[in-house]
Image (cartoon, rainbow, N blue to C red):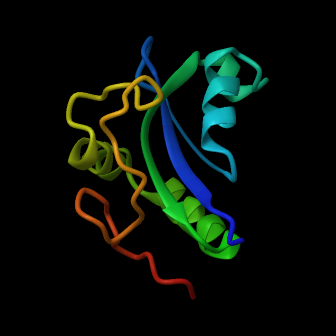
Amino acid sequence: MPKTYYVYIMASQRNGTLYIGMTNNLDRRAWEHREGRVPGFTEKYGIKTLVYFETCDDVRMAIHRETRLKKFTRCRKLELIESANPQWRDLTESHAFALDGPGEPGHDNLDYEFK
């Protein structure tokens, strides 16, 4: 059975700080952020809202994509989020989103190729 990996962006409602991460269990990881169980940066800045994610079938591709997203300018990160989630809804609270990957409508597939 193939594994699914998620590259995600969480945001702080307090100050707009963004956090980019990668996991193989998005529900668990989002819960950990919301409940303050991720010490350090995300706890300090109150990062609790899942605003964007992508899926990958290959862990190396997910790590590569996470690295690329972290290098995006803040403006480009905001454009990526708003292309898929213009209202900045907390995607953990909505059943109206689809788990589709890069290259699908609403997802940025720029610079996605694994090198």
Q: Outermost residue toward the bottom?
A: 115
Quadrant of the rendering where the C terminus is positioned: bottom right
**Percent x, y of residue 37:** 77, 20
Q: Residue at x 55, y 21 (%)?
A: 48
From this view, report whether residue 37 is shown above or below residue 106.
above
Which is more toward the observer, 9 or 93? 93
Q: Quadrant of the N terminus?
A: bottom right
> Residue 39 at x, y = what percent?
79, 23
Q: Residue at x 64, y 74 (%)?
A: 58
Looking at the image, residue 91 sits to the left or right of residue 36; the answer is left
Quadrant of res 27: top right
Task: Looking at this view, name the residue that lies furthest to the front.
Answer: 1
Viewer-side residue, 7 vs 2: 2
- Residue 35 lies, in percent from the top left, at 68, 14
Q: How many marks?
A: 0
Name the residue rendered at 37%, 32% in the picture. Answer: 95
Against 36, is 2 above or below? Answer: below
The answer to which image quadrant residue 60 occupies is bottom right
Tell me residue 33's x, y (percent). 65, 25
**Which residue corresponds to the image point at 42% horizontal and 15% vertical from the top-left?**
13
Task: Judge left or right: residue 53 versus residue 88.
Answer: right
Is residue 27 toward the left or the right of residue 91 in the image?
A: right
User: On the rendered structure, is 37 left or right of 20?
Assistant: right
